[in-house]
Image (cartoon, rainbow, N blue to C red):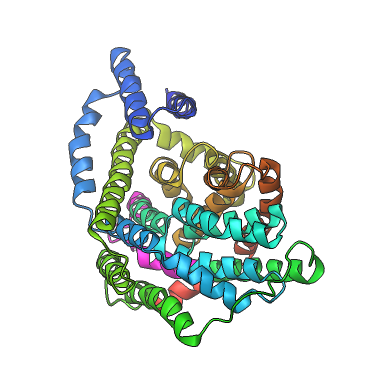
Amino acid sequence: MEWLSLLMFIIVCVVLMFGYPVAFSLAGTALIFAGFGVLFDVFDGSLLSALPSRLFGVMTNQTLLAVPLFVFMGVMLEKSKIAEQLLLSMTQVFGRLPAGMGIAVTLVGALMAASTGIVGATVVTMGLLAIPTMLKTGYKESYATGVVAATGTLGQIIPPSIALVLLGDVLSNGYQQAQLAQGNFSPETISVGDLFAGAIVPGVILVGLYLLYSICIGLFKPEWTPRQTDVEKVSVSVLISSLIPPLVLIFLVLGSILFGVATPTEAAGIGACGAMLIAMTKRSLTLGTLKEVMASTVSVTSMVFMILIGASIFSLVFRGFGGEELIHSLFQNMPGGVFGAILIVMVVIFLLGFILDFIEITFVVVPLVAPVLFMMGVDPIWLGIMIAINLQTSFLTPPFGFALFYLRGVTPKSIPTTAIYKGVIPFIIMQIFMLIALAIWPELATALPNYIYG
């Protein structure tokens, strides 16, 4: 009856496409299948007795405490107008250059991605701030929307990304599970810090590719990106006051994790306090702003943990039907061996990225396939970075990419959707190139963690 597990997975995808809440779709579908399984004597109902201990494990997971703190940090920075001030300063610095606003948007978007770690927030913020000015200056619609959408998705890969926090926790559990299954009862561990370190080089390369593309557009397609001749020069003091605070915050948060000074949860606490201090120095922290930030943090955190609870129920029932053994046998007998298994996983995750957010994919799909891949010898840090960039590419790909939906919601109606689609295609090609480069040279993701942590 192992095929019932795959049928359950397909039914969940169908239910989600009808727009039902993710957490309740996962838990409800799994419990219905378990009920029928018990009724027809193909599922051991006693397996559900393990559910309370699983939920207690979620409640006491110290790593997941970083999620609400990082969300608070990102929302506080978003509400405190830091991105607006930074974009204005960067535009004044680069505006006279070819594609100067595109360069400014890429740099500010990368900083905001590293500061907030939330894809939707970065895309919406940059879309509201940058696109009206770029269009008013005469920038081509497809280029303007493309650079904003692509830069916004950098929050998926640039640390301290919430996606990497969740992925790190799931991959760590899967890695230990795989080692125990292979008879290693003192398993090695990986941490969120390992994943953060592994994401730095690919993230920097992607930002470099985006900048190179903008420079080439400015040089070879100057009519797409008119220079701004009326831009005021920015003073050094204004530039420093807008640039230094987010850079210092990123250094404190990321540096404390990479150098082993603080755990991800402790670093997230530093980030949350630092974001409040920055907002206070900018005189944008009011009681109303604080209430908005706290309400948004509670909303996002509740969504994440409800999905995690639903995914725990789903994965328990999935394994009860023998789904894990089915996946293992499918991967072992797949043509191409490890490469064929990874290719199939990447394609499936890419396609699921059209209908599921990264949280659902992280909690539902990754725990099912990661332990099997680890038993086949796949490096956990490399796999985590590949999944993150793969999802980033999926979120950009027409017609169902999440980043495109976010951007469509904040762009003027005069911009056709086809222009947005055309604009993101070069960036999709760059990200596919990054995936291919990681497949050929895994050291791009693994060398820095190995150097830092041995």
Q: Work out whether residue 53 or residue 45 is closer to the camera in this orientation and state it.
A: 53
Would you say 268 lies left or right of 91 here? left
The quarter of the displayed image where residue 21 is located: top left
Residue depicted at x 50% and y 74%: 447
Q: Dominant secondary structure of the magenta stretch?
A: helix
Q: Which residues are magenta?
A: 177-201
Looking at this view, is 234 or 309 the one in front? 234
- How many tags in the picture? 0
Image location of residue 333, percent across then percent down: 57, 40
449 to 21, vertically: above or below: below
Residue 317 figure quarter: top left
- Rendered location of residue 325, percent (x, y): 42, 36
Q: Where in the figure is residue 381, as x and y percent of width and height? A: 45, 62
From the viewer's perspective, is residue 82 above or below residue 54? below
For the point 45% across and 43% down, the residue is 361
| Image quadrant where one finds the C terminus | bottom left
Quarter location, residue 269: bottom left
Find residue 380 and report its horizontal and vertical position in percent.
45, 59
* Residue 186 lies within the magenta run: yes
Query: 449 above or below 367?
Result: below
369 part of magenta stretch: no
Q: From this viewpoint, which residue is outermost toward the top? A: 40
Q: Please tell me which residue lies in front, 374 or 113.
A: 113
